[in-house]
Amino acid sequence: MKFSLNEIAIFVDGDVYGDPDIKIFEVAEIQNAMDGSITFLGNKMYAKYLETTCASAMIVSDKSLLEGKNGILVDNPQLAIAKVLTMFFPEKPFSKKIHPMSIIDSSAKIGKDVTIEAGAVIESGVEVEENAFIGANSFVGKNSRIGSDCKIFQNVVIYDNSRIGKRSIIHGSVVIGCDGFGFVPEDNEHFKIPQAGKVIIGKDVEIGANTVIDRATIGETIIGDMSKIDNLVHIGHNVQIGKRCLITAQVGIAGSTKIGDNCQMGGQAGIVPHVEIGSYSIIAAKSGVTKSLKGGQMYGGYPARPIRDQHKRDAVHREVSIIKKKVEKLIQSSERH
């Protein structure tokens, strides 16, 4: 598969610099690019490769970087290269067939052009809307609903009464709707609280591999439209996540937490139960949220606080460490004399 530089520029709505007719055969990283490839500069830390890259063309946002080079000028190089990747790696069509080794209850409603692979189990009362894909060995529990154009990849487990919105993507080995962690101590035992609620996943949501989303104890665990959740994330019972949130790997969100729209959470951040995080919050990696946050800014540290306050505390800690070392040296010097 190959495209001219001009064809690529039209597709990404960019301006061509240099030879518009050169042929591009592949997309490559700037440091590893070879003749016939196109690359991009979206992060300044890779600018050191500008002079040594062998790419035939580059996608950049600063035209001065293209002096004497072939390339495309755009506002957002990272977005442009993502679009270029769809040109070279178009999505493969599904079979739109139901494999004879799948198990589908007679009461399930299966829409038009649905693909169901071998070993998938669809229980009673399930509705799978048109153009959905159910991967091999996945399980969809009773009375659940899978929206149109959803992709449920291999080995996914969806418990009873779950709802998956249109065009959502659920990657391999995700578990949706398992019991939340609810126990009440009683006479040196732990009485299990029945988990009788459900999980509601909005439209255009993507959930990474091995993530687990617990069903509500009573009511609903909710993931808002267009939110994207990375691999290995745990979302507890009755959590409510707003629209367009980005949650990266190994984040843990304890039960009954409410998260507003457009929030972002860095890797390994943790949130205690029963707090609210306001819209447009950014939680830095490895931070611990121990109380409700108003939102509209970045938070970091443990306990999480506005990032400027955290930086001030870090600076004071460094200064105290330096002073402590100086004092220790003075004490040692005085003892020698």
Image (tube, grey):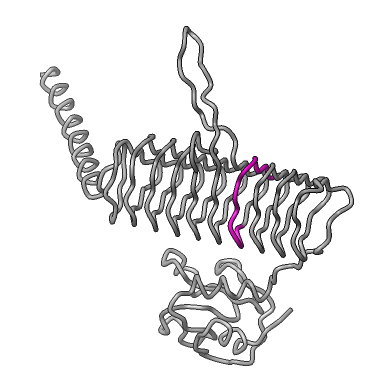
Residue at 22%, 50% (x, y): give it. 308
Residue at 41%, 67% (x, y): give it. 44
| 108 up-or-down from 50: above or below | above
**Residue 14: percent from left, percent from top:** 50, 85
For the record, the magenta segment spans 156-168
**Which quarter of the image is occupied by the N terminus?**
bottom right
**Residue 7: percent from left, percent from top:** 62, 87
Q: Nearer the viewer, residue 104 or 182?
A: 104
Query: Would you identify the image quadrant in which residue 103 lies?
Result: top right
Q: Nearer the viewer, residue 63 or 178?
A: 178
Residue 94 placement, left or right of 297:
right
Residue at 48%, 55% (x, y): give it. 224
| 17 up-or-down from 258: above or below | below
| 67 up-or-down from 200: above or below | below
**Which quarter of the image is occupied by the C terminus?**
top left
Residue 287 placement, left or right of 309:
right
